[in-house]
Amino acid sequence: MTLDLESAIQTIASWLRESRCAMAFTGAGISTESGIPDFRSPGGVWSKNRTVYFEEFLNSEEDRYEYWRQKSQTHVEFEAAAPNVAHQVLAKWEEDEKLTGIVTQNIDGLHQAAGSQNVLELHGTAREIACLSCHQRWAADPWVQQFLKKDRVPDCPDCQGLLKHATVSFGQSLSSETLEASSELAKQADLCFALGSSLVVYPAAAVPELAKSSGARLVIINNTETPLDSMADIVLRHPLGESLSMIHDAFSNLS
Ligand SMILES: [Zn+2]
């Protein structure tokens, strides 16, 4: 559907009002307005650092050190970042029982920081460290500080297992539990917002696709084209924070 911005916003707000089960799917684009660089973009982490694959992490002390070195760098960016208006609008919609949940590709924890409760993190979270053996978890910050101070990769205080950020590394499988819960959410949704994601990374991008094919309306807001644009009900190329604020205002005026 091709609409001018104002009509599109009004239409989306009326869909939100009608909706009984809306969900959001979010990618890096929702966090760039919080100052977290999209790690795929030029100048992003991926272009500066070599990738440490999960297999390498498991098998080489040197690679574990490199992993921790890189993660400690990006940790500083994550710690400094605060949720922006887009995160806040989604948290508000959940509080008002308009939004059932969020499936995110992001590992920055900003949805939770904004107050969202039902957040499914497909790629894990950089806010926590997990033991690969006993699966205990801790807040990431003290471990990163310890690494920076001692310049040595820490191991689990309980079982001496390997400690790694609770994110999904290259070559590591996504949690089947999280994937399943995301699919369930998508199947039940009658309205799906795909926000700030180029929708090219699978299986993540299958979530909004599944929502659409299960009968939901699909609204895509992203600054570049996505492969799902042709199946979307509305596509907006407008800054995310501003778009969601406008939808929220239009929605509040309807209610
Ligand atoms: Zn352990």
Image: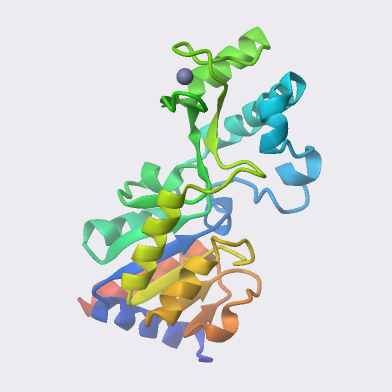
114 displayed left or right of 40: left
Residue at the spot 58% in from the left edge and 77% down from the top edge: 228
249 displayed left or right of 82: left
Vertical order, 137 against 106 (above or below): above
Residue at the spot 56% in from the left edge and 61% down from the top edge: 203
208 displayed left or right of 238: left
The image shows residue 31 at horizontal and vertical percentages of 54, 51
The image shows residue 255 at horizontal and vertical percentages of 20, 76
Vertical order, 31 against 231 (above or below): above
Residue at the spot 62% in from the left edge and 41% down from the top edge: 169
The image shows residue 49 at horizontal and vertical percentages of 78, 37
Asked which quadrant contains residue 210, the reply is: bottom left
Vertical order, 114 against 21 (above or below): above
The image shows residue 62 at horizontal and vertical percentages of 76, 21
**In the depicted view, which residue is nearer to us: 161 or 99?**
161
Q: Is residue 189 visible?
A: yes
Q: Is residue 89 visible?
A: no
Residue at the spot 42% in from the left edge and 67% down from the top edge: 244
**In the depicted view, which residue is nearer to us: 250 or 66?**
66
